[in-house]
Image (tube, grey):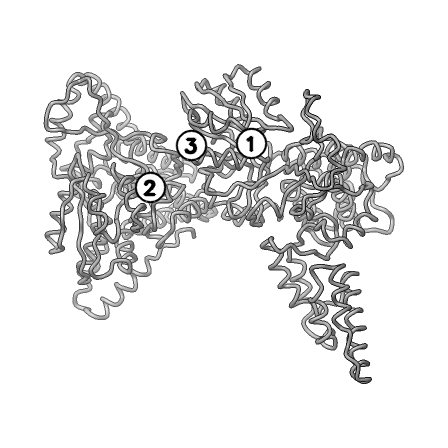
Amino acid sequence: MWYRSPSFILDNQAQEKLLLQQQQHQQNDDVLNPPPPPSMSETSVLNPNPNPNISAYYQTRAAHHAVVTSDWLAQAQAAVAGGVSGEVTAAEVEDGCEVEKGGSVIEEFNSWRKQPDLAEAVAAIRALASVIRSSNATTMMELEIELKKASDSLKSWDATSISLTAACDLFMRYVTRTSALEYEDFNSARSRLIERAEKFGEISYKARRIISMLSQDFIFDGCTILVHGFSRVVFEVLKTAAQNKKLFRVFCTEGRPDRTGLRFSNEMAKLDVPVKLLIDSAVAYSMDEVDMVFVGADGVVESGGIINMMGTYQIALVAHSLNKPVYVAAESYKFARLYPLDQKDMAPALRPIDFGVPVPSKVEIEKSARDYTPPQYLTLLFTDLGVLTPSVVSDELIQLYL
Amino acid sequence: MDRVDANFFNETNDAEKGGNISEVQVSHHEDKKVTSKPLKDKTSKAERRALQEAQRAAKSTKKAAASGVAPPVTEKPTKASKQYPQKKDVPLATSSVSVPEMKGGDRPSEKDKKKDVYHPRMQYDDKSRVEKAKKRSVIDKPEARNRVELFQHLPQYERGNQLRDLESKIFNLDSVHPAVYKVGLQYLSGDVSGSNARCIAMLYAFKEAIEDYHTPVDKILTRDLATRISSYVSFLNECRPLSISMGNAIRYVKARIAKLPSNLTETDTKATLSSDIYRFINEKIVIADKVIVQQAVTKVRDGDVLLTYGCSSVVEMVLVYAHELGKKFRVVIVDSRPKFEGQRLLRRLIAKGLSCTYTHINAVSYVMHEVTKVFLGAASILSNGIVYSRIGTACVSMVAHSFRVPVLICCEAYKFHERVLLDSICTNELGDPDVIAKVSGRKDLNYLDDWVNKKNLQLLNLLYDATPSDYISLIVTDYGMIPPTSVPVIVREYGKEHLF
């Protein structure tokens, strides 16, 4: 099997805990098991991407992590693109048709997506797994086509999200590329597929825990860590480090325009970790105090570089020129078969930016939400496949896709 | 000659090897040799001679010791060392001590090890081996003149006067199939050049030769055919040193022959083999090129200025296809003396209606600032990501790198090789020095006309160079777009695939 996940770390840990505190093992299991999806009735209203000009991925992120509320987002959006409301409705209608086609997947996906600590990709994986479960196909081919359709509709729901696309592709690979196809009996083959789908979902769900365990060795007492934006993986890593009684300091960038860094600093303060907030332009100023840079990733591309929130590239450049290590925490379902050659060589994900004052219409605004950091500026990637150098990413992808 | 490998630039089918210290792999084998030496009973001529000498020396030492005279050991080895530079002390040191051990040991495993070992190509500064090769060779090789010291280990160029010679021999050389002979002549005259074209021509010639083949009465088909192919290969190699891609293709053909089931009839065997060869050409070159074009074209955007160097067939296909898709871009073709291959590409692209700029490599740093992407072909890519290609490629990619222009290499995966290369000195090919001495169309530039007679003048016309992987942003292969660090992954995952 290609998925060489070091999830045994978690298993070992769970075992130890089991031995130590046998009474509490029930709770421990609860932590590892996925929480049940929120009730379908309250989320039955679909929310198709309301504005194709704004990356749905970043809308979700903003809603989950940013200090800025989604109401604010809607207002800002109305202010920025007041005139295009006609188009928006047209797009909505279009989306509506699409939803009817693959309606159940997206419904399911959306219901999972509402959970703030569940990654979009994991939600997609769960949704696809449920497609297999609820499918009434009678042949393998039929099932595969159904699955393909579902994953395509998920992918087209938000083309800007790299992890969503990558996770759908990986799921298809992982689930369909199995000896199950050799089973004589369709039902046993199908149950095998479901089994694999659940396994994949579980691995993906556990990924964050695995990464946080793997990265503990790299956080030493007395270190200063620079963090950019709000990454749930990085948060998990630092939370685990804090729980392990490590003494460290965190520098948070502000993370304009949705100010994800503010939220991150709040969370850090709740954990009693000394934290300092920097404006985005103060990165170079404070880099000499920093021991390591920790960033998440929207996507890990084939070159071993990452696509992440705007500003990651410049932080990596500054860190590289001052010889500070840059660590990336990313789950393996973010590995995408993309190969950007430069910053402009990818589909842009746009988002509104509030400058506080009205900007004259003649002034152009760079609205792109993410940038590409080439592999030579990254030191290591912490993934659920292990701690990798950037060049191994391509190795894993080749083994996966070819 | 039972080896299956057609290790690139493996000149003669001689098991013995000359060393080249600057080559990583060779020094590694030298080590292996030292360990395996005393146990091996099948030594090459030179080694046997060295061994004999050593034994004689040991005897005389004993005699001298008996008679109380100082032993003259020091003289003999030095004499031997002149003749066999690399192996002077190896057989002496080991054999004089451990001659009695020779019969013991686990011989088969050693033999296996020897089979696995890579045989580096012949070193042309090794005089004894050059003599031997000469005796065997079909082509008369005149003494090369005024050779550059650093490149003496490479076969010297002496093609011009061979062509007529070979043409006259065509009727009395029955060991070489006419089709192979034709390809050899084409290599020699330069009519077929470019690693893909050469590889395809060779494979078609082999196919024809196999179809015309009849097993002699007292021979086994697989063995006899393998030796035939080997002799063809060494013939082609004499015409022009093999390219890495050809080496890989030969390895494939030999592996197919070795793996033939023995219960097939001769006709069936021949049909299987020629369909295998056809499949190789189709899958590894023709379809691979199509896949590469599909992938590479996604990197061409409107408004791009693409620079290419020389004349790569894949790059041409990419450019033409991108043009057919209606992308708006401009092409800069960089060319260089003495071959001016870029002009061929230029002519074909202009005929297709692409907008082109043509310039020489001297101006590359000037044109580079307007270029957005560099597309290059390659003769081979080695395991450490080094791209081995037409001379000048390294220069172009270096300039592109310093201008932060991404460099894309289009190369089929069958050209990948598991060796590593550190520089372009160890492995290279020497071209005709006369070509760089003369400037066509300029009769007045005749300073180098009698360069042969000038003892203190050496001309160097290298044909390939090695581009470090740092300068390469992306490699487009039939397995997708990969970074240069992933070449060993492709070699590991798929290198063995076509051998089975």
**Circle 3 SS class:** loop
**Circle 1 SS class:** helix
Residue at 22% in and 18% down: A87
- Provide residue B31's location: percent of width, then percent of height: 62, 63
Tell me which chain the residue with mark 1 is part of. B
Q: Earlier in the sequence, mark 3 or mark 1?
A: 1
- Nearer to us in this view, A173 or B321: B321
- Nearer to us in this view, B193 or A241: B193
Is residue B250 depicted above or below B434 in this figure? below
- Provide residue A240's location: percent of width, then percent of height: 21, 57
**Circle 2 SS class:** strand
Q: Which residue is tagged 3? A: B405
Q: Are marks 3 and 1 in contact (CB under 8 Å)?
A: no
Q: Amino acid at mark 3?
A: Val
Q: Which residue is tagged 2? A: A306
Q: Amino acid at mark 2?
A: Ile
Tell me which chain the residue with mark 2 is part of. A
Tell me which chain the residue with mark 3 is part of. B
Mark 3 neighbour density, 10 Å: few (under 14) some (14–19) many (20 or more) = many
- Judge whether residue A348 can be spotted in this image: yes
| Spatial CA span between label 3 and label 2 | 19 Å
Q: Are marks 2 and 1 in contact (CB under 8 Å)?
A: no
| Spatial CA span between label 3 and label 1 | 24 Å
Residue B141, label in figure:
none
| Image-based side of A31 in relation to B355, left or right | left
Asked whether the residues under marks 3 and 1 belong to the same chain, the reply is yes
